[in-house]
Amino acid sequence: MYEALTDYLPKIQDSDSWVRDTSCYIDYTPTVNEFRKEILTFMNNHPEYELNRYIDTLRTIGTKWGTRGLQRVDVSDLDGKVIMALIMAAERGEYNSQGVILDLLESGTIQKWLLRLKELDN
């Protein structure tokens, strides 16, 4: 179910850089930009996940939006809806505060989320 997103895992894990330039603004690599588009595609294709209400989903697990809060979430027992809410929080956060996705990539958080989605698919 999550293959379109988890297929990015090797590309993200094998990269030592997710940006092309940060002089004036963060210019993500094509891989990261494609991954971000795939998040929105998933949201549009799966309205049952209610990803437009990701903040409400995060509240159900006691998590507030914010990079540090997102990084601390133990995803080992979370279902796909919550993992996707975390991913959506990162995507939406990028609009409000450029660099959220970069921070989550550098900390390995997004990779951890994708690994959990891969487990759920197996």
Image: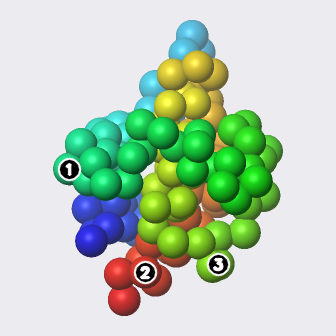
Q: Amino acid at mark 2?
A: Leu
Q: Is residue 103 visible?
A: yes
Q: Position of residue 23 (x, y in %)?
A: 59, 15
Question: First in sequence: mark 3 or mark 1?
Answer: 1
Q: Amino acid at mark 3?
A: Ser
Contact (Cβ within 8 Å) of mark 1 with mark 2:
no
Question: Disc 2 versus disc 3: distance between alpha carbons?
Answer: 10 Å
Which residue sits at x=31%, y=54%? 48
Which residue sits at x=36%, y=89%? 122
Q: Amino acid at mark 1?
A: Asn
Question: First in sequence: mark 1 or mark 2?
Answer: 1
Q: Is residue 22 visible?
A: no
User: Which residue in the protein does label 2 denote?
Assistant: 120
Secondary-structure class at tag 2: helix
Question: Disc 3 versus disc 1: distance between alpha carbons?
Answer: 25 Å
Question: Disc 1 versus disc 2: distance between alpha carbons?
Answer: 18 Å
Q: Residues within 10 Å of mark 2 (few under 14, many from 20)?
A: few
Which residue sits at x=59%, y=43%? 56
Q: Who is closer to the viewer here, 59 or 78?
A: 59
